[in-house]
Amino acid sequence: MKVLYSCLSKSWGGMEMVTITGIKQLLKHNIKVELLCLEESRIQIEANTLGIIIHPVKSHRTPNLFTSLKISSIIKSGSFDIIHSHSSKDLWVIVPALHLLKSRIKLVFTKHIASSIIKKNFLHNKIYKRVNCAIAVSSAIKENLSETTSLEENKIKIVYNGVDLEKFNPDKTNRAKIRTELGVDENCLLIGMTGRFSPGKGHEEFLFAINELNKKYPDIKCIVVGEASRGENEYEDKIKNLAEEYGIKNITFTGYRIDIPDVLAAFDIYVFPSHAESFGVALIEAMALCKASVASNSSGVLDIIDDKINGLLFVAKDRSDLVEKIELLINNPELRKTLGLNARAKIKNKFDLDIVTEQIINIYNQLIK
């Protein structure tokens, strides 16, 4: 089997990381993969290490005849069985390329982010009619696809994003390394969040909660892991300035880290305060490492956390509720342990990356048989 992966994005976030992870997984299953991406994008840089053929294009404006012509040439010479796009925007250059060739290659696209726009006009209908399968990363995304597009219900499949349980294995991480680096004593409670700096990720709510909790629990420490999204440097500065305005001294902003499993291992409480999240890869990574988590009750998170069983949910954007749920975990070490153990069990059962990969390969096989 030969697959052309597509992700025409300049950013580097969950969607792009999942694309690279997906390529690695398919290669492990001896499936040939080539990548269509934007020239000089972060995803091209990451893919350069994978030893695959990469097809960079200059323009990501859609629709774009020149880009479609180049893609048609790539498809014509590639002998692909499947084209798998990780962005619905890519369809605007891929579908015309397929029409130019009168190609019957099966087209799959994964929907990572919900849309607030109804896409049922003539042009959208033509685009989505060519899609053979749409993969939704959560129940919320499946519902969103059904509501906003003309895709037939039987073409929409839920396949969750997965986590590498060997990489995110609590028995293979170095909790002490990061705590030593941060100057955090083993008896000190470390509360943190991970993820790119972008409005809606909940950084303001997190800092509010830490500021309130500091009044009652001055010995806690907190950590914010991640870098600014493309074009969001001002927002990162805003968050750091907010921490200064609150007078929060017990906080560390680590920036981008490649050792996320070890960083998460150092946490005692993980906070996922996004306002609206289509899924939550960062959340399942923390849960895979047995972390007691407090997460907003938003969209895709509801597929991941069963409240009070493998994590705690708070009302999205409700700062007081967030404070209350974190405080509950601060005062209950046994609850933290129970939630953490149940969290890994949930991840093993539902979000194991190997299981997710098999589900995607099964979709491919069903389409080409």
Image: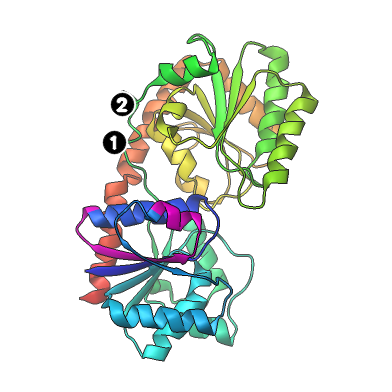
Q: Secondary structure at mark 1?
A: loop
Q: Residue 305: x and y, percent?
A: 47, 40
Query: Which circle's residue, 2 or 1, is located before the other in the chain?
Result: 1
Badge 2 local density, few (<14 within 10 Å), some, or many (20+)? few
Residue, disc 1: 166
Q: Where, quadrant-wise, is the N terminus in this rendering?
A: bottom left
Badge 1 local density, few (<14 within 10 Å), some, or many (20+)? few
Q: Residue at x 65, y 26 (%)?
A: 324
Residues 279 and 177: in front is: 177
Q: Is residue 318 above or below residue 55?
A: above
Q: Where, quadrant-wise, is the C terminus in this rendering?
A: bottom left
Q: Tell me, yes or no, if residue 129 can be seen here.
A: no
Q: Residue at x 34, y 45 (%)?
A: 350
Q: Is residue 29 magenta?
A: yes
Q: Quadrant of residue 152?
A: bottom left
Residue, disc 2: 172
Label 1 amino acid? Answer: Glu
Q: Is residue 184 above or below residue 361?
A: above
Q: Residue 223: x and y, percent?
A: 58, 26
Q: How many marks?
A: 2
Label 2 amino acid? Answer: Lys
Left or right relative to 245: residue 240: left
In the image, the segment drawn in magenta is 28-46
Q: Are marks 2 and 1 in contact (CB under 8 Å)?
A: yes
Q: Is residue 369 magenta?
A: no
Q: Quadrant of residue 108?
A: bottom left
